[in-house]
Image (cartoon, grey):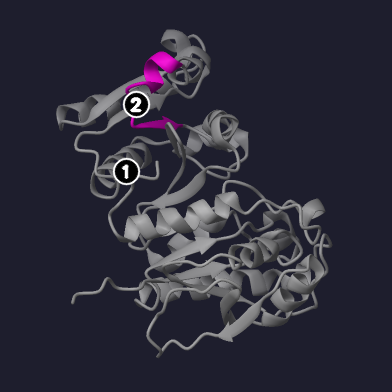
Amino acid sequence: MKTSKTHRIALTAGEPAGIGPDLCIQLAQIAHNCELVVIADPALLALRAEILGLPLKIINFNPLAQAIPQKAGTLTVFPTLLQKTAVSQQLNKANSLYVLETIRLATQGCVDGLFSAMVTAPIHKGVINDAGIKFTGHTEYIAKISGGNPIMMLATEGLRVALVTTHLPLHKVSKAITQKSLQQIIEGLEKDLRLRFGIEKPNILVCGLNPHAGEGGYLGTEEIETIEPVLGQLRQQGLNLQGPLPADTAFTPKYLATADAVLAMYHDQGLPVLKHMGFGKAVNITLGLPIIRTSVDHGTALTLAGTGQANCESLKLAVTMALNLINSDTRLF
């Protein structure tokens, strides 16, 4: 009798002072049809489980053993040690290298075939930069290790939003959007919507950069000089693209009803709408990589760490989405 393979998914616990460890422990309270390997300090997880009053059996990860489905109440842990003992709600820049090492191990494990996918809990970019490490985010850091051209996309029920630029100050956005980069992102988004999400001919709404999409150049010329030429060229190649549309038009029911994804020019142009629709019930998916990576739709929520009030729904969905992408089954969203 043929049996389906049990996949092994790496799970990084994120910022040790935040809710990441809590979410991993909450996730461990239910059984999973994959093996979750949490890359973290076992002592941190054991202490946080004690604080939360949740049962937890820690199993040391054995990369040579056959992957088996995760049992409720257990966590398979790839031991990675903190530089300093972590205290809930208290950031410590001494642990920045630890955070980056957990991401590196997960990414490299995916590249090497040790893991089928990786799922990341939230990190705190500020404290990593305070440690003197230039860091813009998970998406860019993972791509440096795995290769590829990363595209940040968040998805919830009824809406997918991808970004042309990610974690940039607003005054740098315009210069970062070039014809080359925009074409690369649109082609990558269209390809992954077809191959990973099974959408035969994706309908992508492309936002303009400026209010009213520049209003014929009176409110900005980026649409005329950069965005429209790229869309015209790609339409000639058969891509189904609408735009550039004013963002306040693109995110209306009439347009979203037939859209497979909306491409926003910058972080806060697109993500507030998505989070309004499905905060806590959305998944962050990095497209354009040779590996599968998903994440939560929220931050470290320091004030909730160690209180038992954190909600692990988004992390649970991120694991489900990662497993679906492995199996080419994306019915989740």
Q: Nearer the viewer, residue 227 or 275?
A: 275
Of callouts 2 and 1, the N-terminal one: 1
Look at the numbered disc 2 and give the secondary structure of its residue.
loop
Q: Are marks 2 and 1 in contact (CB under 8 Å)?
A: no
Q: Residue at x 40, y 90 (%)?
A: 64
On the rendered image, what quadrant is the N terminus found in? bottom left
Residue at label 2?
A: 259
Q: Residue at x 32, y 38 (%)?
A: 186
From what the image shows, is residue 162 above or below residue 277?
Answer: below
Tell me the quarter of the picture where residue 129 sits. bottom right
Q: Residue at x 48, y 20 (%)?
A: 247
Magenta region: 253-264
Mark 1 Cα-neighbour bin, 10 Å: few <14, some 14–19, many ≥20: some
Mark 2 Cα-neighbour bin, 10 Å: few <14, some 14–19, many ≥20: many
Q: Is residue 270 left or right of residue 330?
A: right
On the rendered image, what quadrant is the C terminus found in? top left
Whether residue 289 appears in magenta in the rendering, the answer is: no
> Is residue 252 at least partly visible in the picture?
yes
Residue at label 1?
A: 184
Residue 249 at what x, y percent from top left?
Answer: 46, 14
Q: Is residue 133 left or right of residue 259?
A: right
From what the image shows, is residue 325 above or below residue 178?
Answer: below
Residue 238 at what x, y percent from top left?
Answer: 16, 30
